[in-house]
Image (cartoon, helix red, strand yellow):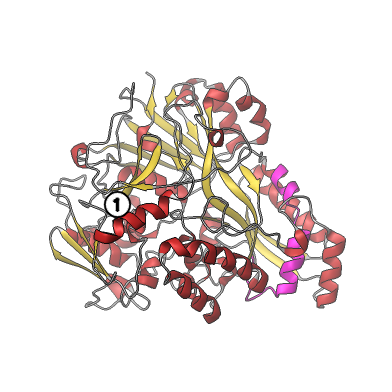
Amino acid sequence: MRWARVLIAGAAGFLVFVAGCEAPVSNEPSSPDQTGSGTVGQTASNLMPDAEGRAPEVPGAKPGGTLSVPYASTPANFDPSDQYDADTLAILGITHRTLTSYAFREGRSVLVPDLATDLGVVSDDGLTWTFTLKEGITYEDGSPVTAQDVVFAIKRSFDKDLAANAPTYQRDFFKDGADYLGPYQGDKDWKGAEATDDQTVVIHLRKRFESLPFFAAYPQFSPIPEEKDTKQDYTLHPLATGPYKFDKYTPGSELTLVRNDQWDPDSDPARNNYLDGYDFRFGVSDGKVQAAILASDGVDATSLNWSPLDSSLARQVEGPKKDQFVEGPSTCVFTVNLDTRKIPMPVGKAVAVAYPFDSIRKAAGESTHSYTPGTTFIPPQIPGWVDYKGVDGFDGTGNGDPAKAKEMLKEAGEEQFELSYYYNKDSPGGRKVNEARKQGLEKAGFTVADKGVSARERRALAGKLDAPINMLQDPVRWCFDWPSADSIFPPTVASVALSQGGTGWGNISDPTIDSRIARIQALPIGEQGPEWGTFDRWLFETYLPAIPYQYSKANYVFGTKVRNVINDPNRGMPVMTQIWIEQ
């Protein structure tokens, strides 16, 4: 995080003081936090501003083979401007290079320059960042990547039609970003980001943003040539700069990637390309897929699933199939999102008291390999975490207290209050989860209006601010963007979170919250941790925008021919380009 010049030492200190959890360099766990120990683990990211390509070779790795990745979720799209979900970030991380990127070195996740020559140079006042691009990088069609392309991509991430689900840090921090509408609808003279020549990207801020080099690892900083932008159709084949490119994409069903022969490994310190390609399949049954992968017949031997482990398979991965399973630290807090515009706080408290957490987990086939119960918006591995119990001491376990919740509704004058939400009707698991949820809430005296939709529709509909529901909108879970709470609260509960037209926790826009966030953000990064911990509890007790109930753990089930599956604790996803297949 080149807090450049005099700030570089302080930046490294900020990230190193989080106790590190080293991921393994093979499929054998190398620390307790990589196994089924029940702990969440802690995360760290060092900085490697001088890293150059090519990425170190994985010992023993052999080229060849296609990795199949079937899983239950269904991405809404693959437009780089619109991405903020862990699965699509992992996939685009194979095909698209960004200004900076995470690399895996000596068992640790580190931030390295990617398209840029360093991690950025910041001005003395902290309001101007300069990134210089490496020479000779091209797209899959052989055309050169320019600073103008990166700037266009940054501008495009402000467009509410093309990037409704994008991060909102750029709106919050970039100069005049709050009201900018992007390159098609916005001010032609907007100067929040500019290219001073073909190799130089300059970003102007309205306030200091010490975490900008981490944000620059997101797909919103991957170049898009303006003349080749097909707007809503760009998702069908975004131009690759990484080691793989789109081959065939059937929205809602499948995506195949093949090698990109225009990728230059000598300029890329983050990626290897051992595989011939990838085959991603969406909307499948995770339990069935995981069982098949553990059996490893045919294509299942070269497959990987990254969804939470089905509880029915726990004994296998704890025993004879332990070499086909990796568990490690992840980044997410799962919540029951409540629309505070529609749900009064006393009703929200009754929801927390009534919620059948364990029945839902059982219906979903979850096991303690994939989660730890929790009650806070900040996960334990983030500096400043404060452990507190929310409404009447609930701890994210059990099946609720329907009698008590009924009494709470009666006292609030809200008997038979209607709760409405979308659920995934495509899979048996989705239907089972909904039935467990609905029964628990109805026992507590709520009226439940459950709206079954397809998996792909649910992700899109639940992200709409004006959706005709009052709970379980996105984010259903929040995965920190880098190991600090300044990547948790501003994009979820600050007013800017709603500025793209998407949703946040509670769908809140409140100046009191904004002022508290701004005060903490103005502190040196090393002093922010305890302040965010205090903010966490205050937010829950004052607004109850969501009910946090568990911290995630990363789970990977893979076939007998799949090698070197490593968890990246800063993404909660596997390091995709270090995987290889035994031929």
- In the image, taking residue 171 as reference, residue 143 lies left or right, namely left
Residue lying at 79% horizontally and 51% vertically, measured from the top left: 399
Rate crowding at label 1 as few (under 14), some (14 to 19) or many (20 or more) other CA atoms within 10 Å: many
Label the magenta part by its dominant secondary structure: helix
Q: Viewer-proximal residue, 525 or 238?
A: 525
In the structure shown, which secondary structural element does the residue marked by tag 1 occupy? Answer: strand
The image quadrant that residue 183 belongs to is bottom left
- Is 434 in front, or is 274? 274
Residue 26 in picture, x, y percent from top left: 44, 26
Residue 506 image offset from top left, x and y in percent: 60, 69
Q: Is residue 213 above or below residue 48?
A: below
**What residue lies at 42% left-to-right and 28% top-to-bottom?**
564
The image shows residue 263, relative to residue 460, as above or below, that is: above
The residue type indicated by label 1 comes to Thr
Residue 223: x percent and y percent? 25, 56
Quadrant in the picture for residue 80: bottom left
Residue corresponding to mark 1: 100
At which x and y percent is residue 98? Answer: 29, 52
Q: Is residue 469 visible?
A: no
Q: Nearer the viewer, residue 111 or 543?
A: 111
The N terminus sits in image quarter: bottom left
Taking the image as shown, residue 335 lies to the left or right of residue 407, namely left
Quick check: can you spot residue 577? yes
- The magenta-colored residue range is 338-362
Q: Quick one: quadrant of the C terminus?
A: top left
Q: Is residue 263 left or right of residue 344?
A: left
> Could you tell me which residue is drawn at 34 percent across and 53 percent down?
217
Is 349 within the magenta?
yes
Magenta-colored stretch includes residue 370: no
Q: Residue at x 81, y 70 (%)?
A: 416
